[in-house]
């Protein structure tokens, strides 16, 4: 079962409404670990001179993976994490007040 829409947005570091009017966001089971890691990294954004996030601090990733007990293909998980990171940065670029 997918988390509530507003909870999904929060976990992804988005503002309410960023995912549109869809009430349910399906996440394939094989992608859920990447979503959980992304949520755990929400305090680990690098902020540029403009004061805006410019990317995640990857040096925090091994600690988070270990603490969450993530097993399996970490390279695949990292690829999914990068997809979500780019998506959030794209939303922030489109909405400069966020």
Image (cartoon, grey):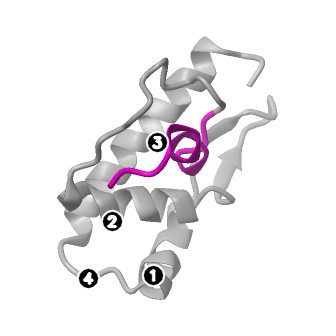
Q: Give the mark toward the camera: 3 or 2.
A: 2
Q: Position of residue 64 (x, y in %)?
A: 50, 76
Any mark on residue 71, and which? 4
Q: Distance between the residues labelled 2 and 4?
A: 9 Å
**Disc on the earlier residue, 3 or 2:** 2
Quick check: 83 left or right of 71? right
Q: Position of residue 77 (x, y in %)?
A: 28, 61
Labelled pair 2, 1 in contact (Cβ < 8 Å): yes
Any mark on residue 33, and which? 2
Q: How crowded is mark 4: few (under 14 residues within 10 Å), some or many (20 or more)?
A: few
Q: Distance between the residues labelled 2 and 1?
A: 9 Å
Question: Which residue is located at x 73 percent, y 33 percent?
Answer: 52
Q: How far apart are marks 4 and 1 (CA)?
A: 9 Å
Residue underneath mark 1: 68
Residue underneath mark 3: 85
Name the quadrant of the C terminus. top right
Any mark on residue 38, and which? none
Quick check: 29 left or right of 53? left
**Disc on the earlier residue, 3 or 1:** 1
Local secondary structure at mark 3:
helix
């Amino acid at each position: 079962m997918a988390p509530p829409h507003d909870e999904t947005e929060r976990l992804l570091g988005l503002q309410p409404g960023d995912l549109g009017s869809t009430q349910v966001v399906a996440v394939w089971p094989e992608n859920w670990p990447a979503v959980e890691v992304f949520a755990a990294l929400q305090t680990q954004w690098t902020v540029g001179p403009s004061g805006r996030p410019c990317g995640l601090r990857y040096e925090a990733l091994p600690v988070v993976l270990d603490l969450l007990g993530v097993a399996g293909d970490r390279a695949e998980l990292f690829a999914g994490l990068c997809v979500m990171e780019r998506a959030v940065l794209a939303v922030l670029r489109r909405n400069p007040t966020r």
